[in-house]
Image (spheres, rainbow, N blue to C red):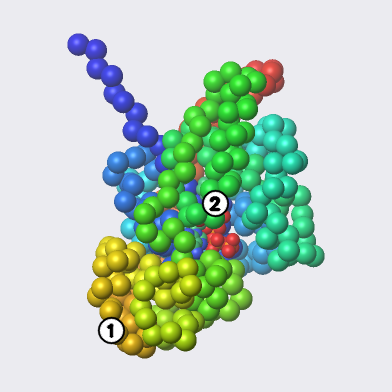
Amino acid sequence: MEQTVERKKRIFSGMQPSGELTLGNYLGALKNWIKLQDEYDCMYSIMNMHAITVRQDPAELRKRSLEVLMQYIACGIDPEKSILYFQSHVSAHAELAWILSCNTQMGELSRMTQFKDKSKKHADNINAGLFTYPVLMAADILLYQADLVPVGHDQLQHIELTRDVANRFNFHYGETFTVPEPYIGKTGARVMSLQSPENKMSKSDPNPNGYIWLLDPEEVIIKKFKRAVTDSDTEIRAGEDKPGITNLLTIYAAVTGKTVEEAEKEFSGFGYGNFKQAVGEAVAAELTPVREKFAQLQSDKAYVEDIYKKGAETAAKIASKTLRKVYKKVGFVAW
Ligand code: ATP
Ligand code: LTN
């Protein structure tokens, strides 16, 4: 009897080592990545080529890139189940990005809000890479024929562009790429800054009180939550008029696995001070094992190196298949 082995659906995602990972990265992305590992073929990369669209100190970037990898593992990404590697170790990313850039319109790229935000933030360095950033991201995803891309809410526009580029390429050159879907988790898709809850919690925020670093010690986490900006009201409920409290409720719900409504009930009648303390403690409890695992990994460099080398080897094999197909489709002479 003929047996058809169905390929598991593929997941691709990554983060830039542009700063220390935050609770936003964890709840918006990493926590979902971990859940998906059993059901899908997952690839999680460290997007160091994207990170240099903003000026980086080379020694810092190298150190941080390794730390991001160790934080993926410390949070629960299992190297036995998922492929982990550095983007720069697989040259096909840059090669496919070139082909895709010839199939992406300037107009499409100028509409990207991340480009607009970042060019305001880095007005002295609006480089071409910052502008073509989404093309490299499309290459990351399309190289591996990914079906799903788990990201936070802020990346939806980039995934939409990836889909447009894939569809356009498939239309002009014939079926080549899987058209990926975004995957947004139910809770924690938008974790906001603790200091300005109308902005997302970001690892490049200059004010460290705005974010929780995944490796912050327990007392620092609790202190940052105690200082979180709320409002002059006293009611613990979610609502558009209460961005600070809503954010804290969302964070609490995401780490405890409860719903926001359940959290509202649990804290009804609490003062803001006790509420903030409880959220801080819940987050600290979730992050303590991450910090401990990270410390262990730091003392096992050989183990970590083995993971990213093997990861790059496997990734390169998959990527080169797609790249060859693309080169053929666009009319490059075979070699
Ligand atoms: P930067 O501020 O340097 O642009 P970032 O903190 O937004 O960085 P990225 O590397 O761009 O981090 O994002 C990694 C992943 O984490 C993405 O999937 C992104 O959507 C998600 N993410 C980042 N910040 C948040 C947040 N505050 N809430 C939910 N998800 C987030
Ligand atoms: N742009 C993303 C990081 C990123 C990514 C990717 C995410 C680069 N390439 C491919 C998912 C898939 C960000 O800033 N979060």
Give the residue number, with chain letter if any, for mark 1: 269
Q: Relative to 313, does residue 6 appear above or below in the rendering?
A: above
Between disc 1 and disc 2, the foreground one is 1
Give the residue number, with chain letter if any, for mark 2: 155
Around disc 2, counting alpha carbons within 10 Å, would you say few (fewer than 14), some (14 to 19), or many (20 or more)?
A: some
Q: CA distance from mark 1 to mark 2?
A: 37 Å
Left or right: 216 in relation to 88:
left
Around disc 1, counting alpha carbons within 10 Å, would you say few (fewer than 14), some (14 to 19), or many (20 or more)?
A: few
Q: Residue at (37%, 81%) from the top-left corner?
A: 235
- Which label number is shown at residue 224? none
Q: Residue furthest top?
A: 1
How many numbered marks does the figure carry? Answer: 2
Residue 31 visible in the displayed image: yes
Q: Quadrant of residue 42?
A: top left
Q: Residue furthest left?
A: 1
Q: Amino acid at mark 2?
A: Gln
Question: Could you tell which of marks 1 and 2 lies nearer the N-terminus?
Answer: 2
Picture coordinates of residue 207, whole percent (x, y)? 58, 79
Q: Relative to 150, does residue 118 appear above or below in the rendering?
A: below
Q: Residue at (20%, 11%) from the top-left corner?
A: 1
Left or right: 249 in relation to 86:
left
Q: Amino acid at mark 1?
A: Gly
Q: Quadrant of residue 284?
A: bottom left
Picture coordinates of residue 212, whole percent (x, y)? 46, 74
